[in-house]
Image (cartoon, rainbow, N blue to C red):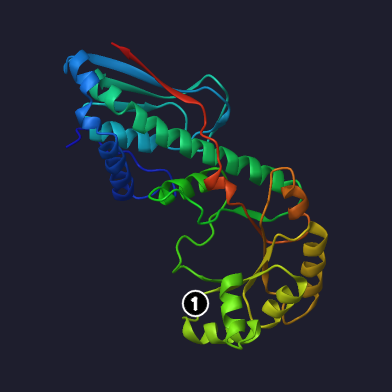
Amino acid sequence: MSTQTPKPLPAGHPAREIVAAIVAAALAEDRAAFDITTQATIPPDQPGEATVLYKEPGVVCGIEVVREVMRQMSPDLVLDVRVEEGAWVESGTVAAEIRGPLAPMLSGERVALNLLQRMSGTATMARRYSDEAARGGTANVVDTRKTTPGLRALERYAVRTGGAHNHRNTLEDGVLIKDNHIEAAVARGVSPGDLITEVRARVPHTVKIEVEADTPHLARAAAMGGADAVLLDNMPPDMMRAIVAELRERPETKHVLFEASGGIRIETIAAVAATGVDLISVGALTHSAPALDISLDVRPA
């Protein structure tokens, strides 16, 4: 049992029990409790200190996860935060300091860094994409379900910390009718519009229905058929702009949200935002964000 008083979690942070379970699984995977090198070289009573050093610019995200790693390694490890979660830092910034027994600090080092680097990298990419999108319009940048299995809660929190937003979290959180669903319906003689009607009758009234469309014709059919949102998939900006303008002029479809998706890059996101879409989904935020260069500089006290 830790002797430290639990610190308040940042707003929107995953619950302690979720973080604890992820950390426990990561430490067990690394066999951190059986670190034969540290056990053979470091006396259990030798003290140590460490600094969490950001070696490149980016968004700080995951400090409380580092705290949980250290807590699980030893109740005597204490982490002092120097930079607030969500802050942009420059290279050379010390975000936190750790002190306590050296051996468990060393054994937990890799897991702490793996999670911190990944979360900070995701938050940094989310910040960059959001800032770039704001140059073109008011669309919110959102993530996708293309997350690392087992780390979704942390990665989606990192997206929010970076200033972007979350799409549906799981398959039960909303209806997203994609091309495979539409093809299956057409094969049994059901049109996209009729499919939306069928779905509306099968789900609670509180559930939103979004339809993926890769052509203007399908986008119109989805909007006219009662979809709450239309995902414009892999369309060039000029095509998206025309669809959004046309359907927002119609009284029966002016309430529909429009999401752009597919192949969105940092170089193109401003142009996509300028089309007038409400949302821009970017799978790269979680599946391709590079880990930020962060070190845990450990030294004997």
Image coordinates of residue 26 in percent, x first then y, are 31, 39
Which residue is rendered at x = 36% and y = 28% of the image?
Answer: 110
Secondary structure of the residue carrying numbered label 1: loop
Instruction: Tell me: residue 291, above or below residue 16.
Output: above
- The part of the image, by quadrant, that contains residue 252 is bottom right
Left or right placement of residue 136 versus residue 115 in this view = right
Instruction: Tell me: residue 126, above or below residue 95.
Output: below
Q: Is residue 174 visible?
A: yes
Q: Is residue 75 visible?
A: no
Question: Callout 1: 10 Å neighbours few (<14), some, many (20+)?
Answer: few
Which residue is rendered at x = 68% and y = 52% of the image?
Answer: 263
Which residue is rendered at x = 63% and y = 77% of the image?
Answer: 227
Image coordinates of residue 219 in percent, x first then y, are 71, 73
- The part of the image, by quadrant, that contains residue 41 is top left
Left or right placement of residue 137 versus residue 280 in this view = right
Tell which of 73 and 182 is nearer to you. 182
Say what amino acid the circle numbered 1 marks: Thr
Which residue is rendered at x = 33% and y = 23% of the image?
Answer: 98
Instruction: Tell me: residue 299, above or below residue 263.
Output: above
Image coordinates of residue 165 in percent, x first then y, are 56, 53
Tell which of 17 and 292 is nearer to you. 292
Left or right placement of residue 218 versus residue 99 in this view = right
- The part of the image, by quadrant, that contains residue 7 is top left
**From the image, which quarter does the C terminus lie in?**
top left
Instruction: Tell me: residue 109, above or below residue 251.
Output: above
Residue indicated by mark 1? 206
**From the image, which quarter does the N terminus lie in?**
top left
Marks counted in the figure total 1
Tell which of 262 and 64 is nearer to you. 262
Left or right placement of residue 66 versus residue 121 in this view = left
